Amino acid sequence: MAVKNRIKNARGQVAFEFLLIYSFFIFVFLTSLYIIAGKAIEQQRYAEGIYAREFIVMIADEINAAATIEGYEKNISIPTTISSVPYKLYIYKGMVGLNYSSLADIDLLYPLSTDNIVVNGGDSTSNIRYINTAKGKFKIINSDGQVTIYDG
């Protein structure tokens, strides 16, 4: 009878040690996954920021080109979303701005060479003039030194 109890106790101890080791490896695995997922999110935030900066510079370059070349006219295609998230593109006091929220809140401003810009033929005196990005395109025209941006 004593031998059977020792064998039962030994089996119980082996099972407990197995579960303890198994739990340790599960913990290490889950911790590794957490760290890797955090790094992936960090990389995506960085990539979104870089893309947003390049995008706003491209838009500013087009507007600056229109401001310096009389009779300039160009249709520009833009993405309707950034990382599947709608964004706002606007003109504010001689700056072009980009705002969106995905993994990170991004609000960028980039200087323009002129403040003589009208969006959709509207009032050029209002502080913030939004460009409709939902259509995925807009047109820039320089007529008599005035840059006009037409959505779609």
Image (cartoon, rainbow, N blue to C red):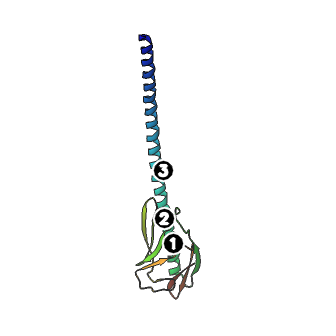
Between circles 3 and 1, the one closer to the viewer is: 3
Q: Amino acid at mark 1?
A: Ile
Identified at 45% across, 29% down, the residue is 19
Q: Residues within 10 Å of mark 1 (few under 14, many from 20)?
A: some
Which residue is situated farthest in the front direction here?
1
Report the front residue among 51 and 100: 100
Q: Amino acid at mark 2?
A: Ala
Badge 3 marks a residue whose secondary structure is: helix
Mark closest to the chain's N terminus, 1 or 2: 2
Q: Which mark is residue 40?
A: 3
Label 1, label 2: how many angstroms apart (C-alpha)? 11 Å
Residue at 41%, 83% in the rendered image: 126
Residue 14 locus on image (x, y percent): 45, 22
For the residues bearing labels 3 and 1, Cβ distance under 8 angstroms? no
Up-down relation of residue 111 to residue 35 (above or below): below
Residue sitting at x 53%, y 75%:
62
Q: Position of residue 34 (x, y in %)?
A: 44, 45
Disc with the residue nearer the chain's start (2 vs 3): 3
Indicate the position of residue 75 as horizontal and vertical percent values. Answer: 59, 77
Looking at the rendered structure, the secondary structure element under dot 2 is helix
Residue 106, position as x, y percentages in the image: 43, 64
First in sequence: mark 3 or mark 1? Answer: 3
Q: Which residue is mark 1?
A: 59
The amino acid type of the residue labelled 3 equals Ala
Look at the image and tell me in which quarter the N terminus lies. top left
Viewer-proximal residue, 114 or 128? Answer: 128
Instruction: Please tell me whether mark 2 or mark 3 is closer to you in this view.
Output: 3
Residue at horizontal 47 percent and vertical 48 percent from the top: 37
Q: Which mark is residue 52?
A: 2
